[in-house]
Image (cartoon, helix red, strand yellow):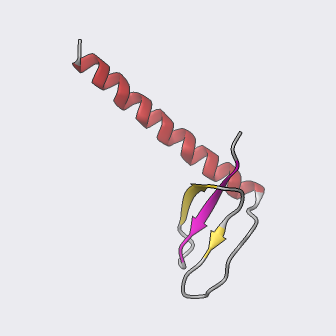
Amino acid sequence: MKAMHISHDCCGHGQETHAGHARQQGCCGFTRHHITKDERREALEGYRDQLKLELAGVEERLEELK
């Protein structure tokens, strides 16, 4: 499985991206290089939820094409 990281803005809002570690940049200028187990779980759960929504959209589109 490909490693992923979460990019955070200055307010701590995360954005899932692909790489190996989290990065927090913004007004504070601090860059994180490692994420916690909980952050990784949260990122993976968000990714899973997005995949479920994508699958639902594909299923709807396939029904429309029948």
Viewer-proximal residue among 34 and 56: 34
Q: Is residue 5 left or right of residue 49?
A: right
| Quadrant of res 19 | bottom right
Outermost top residue: 66
Residue depicted at 66% across the width and 83% down the height: 30
Residue in front for this viewpoint, 48 or 30 = 30
Find residue 37 and report its horizontal and vertical position in percent: 77, 55
Q: Is residue 20 left or right of residue 63?
A: right
Marks counted in the figure total 0
Where are the magenta residues, as a range? Answer: 3-9
Residue 1 vertical placement versus 23 (above, below): above
Tell me residue 34's x, y (percent). Answer: 76, 65
Which quadrant: the N terminus? top right
Kindly indicate the quadrant of the structure image that contains residue 55: top left
Give yes or no for residue 36 being in the magenta stretch. Answer: no
**What secondary structure prevails in the magenta region?**
strand
Q: Quadrant of residue 57?
A: top left
The answer to whether 58 appears left or right of 41 in the picture is left
Residue at 55% across, 47% down: 46
* Quarter placement of the C terminus: top left
Q: Residue furthest bottom?
A: 28
Q: Residue at x 48, y 42 (%)?
A: 50
- Whole-percent x, y for residue 48 in the image: 56, 39
Vertical position of residue 57 compared to residue 33: above or below:
above
Give the residue drawn at x 71%, y 61%.
21
Q: Could you say where residue 23 lies in the image, as x and y percent from the top left?
A: 64, 69
